[in-house]
Amino acid sequence: MTHSRSSLFATAVLCGLFAVPAARMAAQQSTPPPSAGAATQDDQDPLKRKRSDKETLDARKNLRTELKGAYKTWLEQDVAYIITDEERKAFRSLSNDEERESFIENFWLRRNPNPDSPENEFRDEHYRRIQYANDHYAAGKPGWKTDRGHIYIAFGKPDSTDSHPSGGAYQRPIEEGGGQTSTFPFETWHYRYLEGIGDNIDIEFVDTCQCGDYHFTIDRSEKDALLRVPGAGLTQWEEMGMAKKADRFKGSGEALGLGPQSSGQNTKEFDRIELAAKLFAPPPIKFKDLEGFISEHTILTGPPLPFDVRTDFVRVTESTVLVPITVQLKNRDLTFVTKDGVSTASVNILGKVTTLTHKTVQTFEDTVSVQEPAELLEKALDSKKIYWQALPLLPGLYRIDIAIKDVNNPDHVGLYGRGINVPTFDDEKLSTSSLILSDNLAPVDSHSVGTGTCVIGGTKICPRVQAGPATPVSYKRNQNLAFWMQVYNLSIDEQSKSNLAKVTYQIIDSTTNNVIFEKEIESKDLGAHSNQLTVEKLLPIAGLQPGKYKVTIKVNDTISKQEIAQSAPFVVE
């Protein structure tokens, strides 16, 4: 079940019905009909011609059946168990193949644990699970359609499996009355932990048709092949005359035998029903209340929770841009609860990226906590907490909405909504990523490249976030100034197979426009044979007097004769 561009198909177009104004109809009634064979103006213009009932019904049918071929397979088979209801609805609303291709690419990109890598471990593992399900669980239908296939694709291999492929003799546990019976083939899958479901989860499948089609069951008595055979498969208590087999069917739950530890067995029926609902439900939106603030524009009832947001742009591939989003909160704006000497504040964060036509292309949600020793809380209130999320997007115009709720004060909610223009990085044009300022940067090990908070490529750098569009980031004189920027599309000399550019970075006094510090380096010193370079530096600023400054990085490609520069302001307190 792979996705191919070769199966692109034409999209049916549904034209709107055009009602004729009453005044115009009256005028038509008073006007003699045209002679036979003469075409009226409305007949000549198909947009103004009223459709017949059959044409209207055909158009509606075409719209409903528009999704077909590879896209229908992708939606209804490939990702049937992992796509959210919101994503499914968004995909069905797309109007052409280009939009569907973009949606599918971003669907896998936002699930990629390493967005910088051309490989997508999540997607590869997902399709491996589908293939495994088809190879091992097929039973008159593809393995992915079976209950075992569904669970395997959604949650992966169980931690342990108790398999009885031939059924046969089975010794009941004492809480089910003990004794021996004969069973249909069955399996019990055990998971130590499933996110959003719980710990020590047992999932039972029974093959009552003995045809290899194991179905999920919440009734543990269903595997008993002698359950409805009078006088057969008695429990130990029934054999001792302490219970009757007919007693098993008096309740509305499982028909389990009675035993010395059977009290409350049937009271767990609702727990098993709830487990089944969770196992087969699509991935939920964790913060449904925050979804209302974004999608339904719910009015805030309490004081707003202030926070600042920064977006950056880093090229990943020719058509994909990584958009790191940094959210900054002040500890002083959060509600701390102290318990056992520890003060804790938590916020729920929900973000959504939509197109100009309100189609959702990316979502993210998380919980961020701050913990401080109670005796140090007052000092910690002057600190800030950041949340970082990197989203892969195609170039174009989008809107980003973020809602944040204070867990310890549910009426304390903050909202953010802005448009962003994700740039196109032309292959023939010298270009750069955003220039990111921080107070620290550090290389990461080979196993952490492109993964983790604030990690871009092989560097960890957490951006400083401005308090407002016109407010530069600030530093204290005992801190360091770190900056990071990537350069794209440097030309390579055909003979030396090397780039040849000059990279200059400066610290400029914004008040006097004087250059305080300047350093020039050769591009070949950063990577001679690459058309992409990373410029990064950590500088102490103890020698700078309080005031306004800016960092400027200039790149002069002597082969292509192109120049480019990026600047970012900052303040020294």
Image (tube, rainbow, N blue to C red):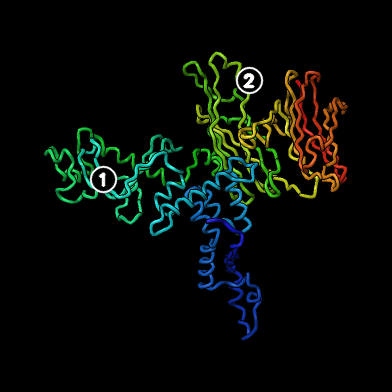
Q: Which residue is mark 2?
A: 382
Classed neighbour count for the residue bearing mark 2: other residues with Cα under 10 Å, few (<14), some (14–19), many (≥20): few
At 61% across and 33% down in the image, what residue appears?
Answer: 453
At 88% across and 27% down in the image, what residue appears?
Answer: 514
At 46% across and 44% down in the image, what residue appears?
Answer: 156
The mark tally for this picture is: 2
In-image side of 164 versus 331 (left or right)? left
Gap between marks 1 and 2 measured at Cα = 61 Å
Who is closer to the viewer here, 566 or 450? 450
Task: Give residue 267's position: percent from left, percent from top.
Answer: 27, 37
Q: Is residue 345 above or below residue 373?
A: below
- Outermost residue, left direction? 241
Q: Which residue is mark 1?
A: 221
In-image side of 216 versus 459 (left or right)? left
Identify the secondary structure beneath mark 1: helix
Task: Give residue 158's position: percent from left, percent from top.
Answer: 42, 41
Who is closer to the viewer here, 393 or 374? 393
Name the kind of residue labelled 1 in the image.
Answer: Ser
Q: Is residue 448 above or below residue 422?
A: above
Name the kind of residue labelled 2 in the image.
Answer: Asp
Compare marks 1 and 2 and give the one earlier in the sequence: 1
* Tag 1 and tag 2, C-beta contact below 8 Å: no
At 87% across and 27% down in the image, what residue appears?
Answer: 515
Task: Give residue 122's position: percent from left, percent from top.
Answer: 55, 44
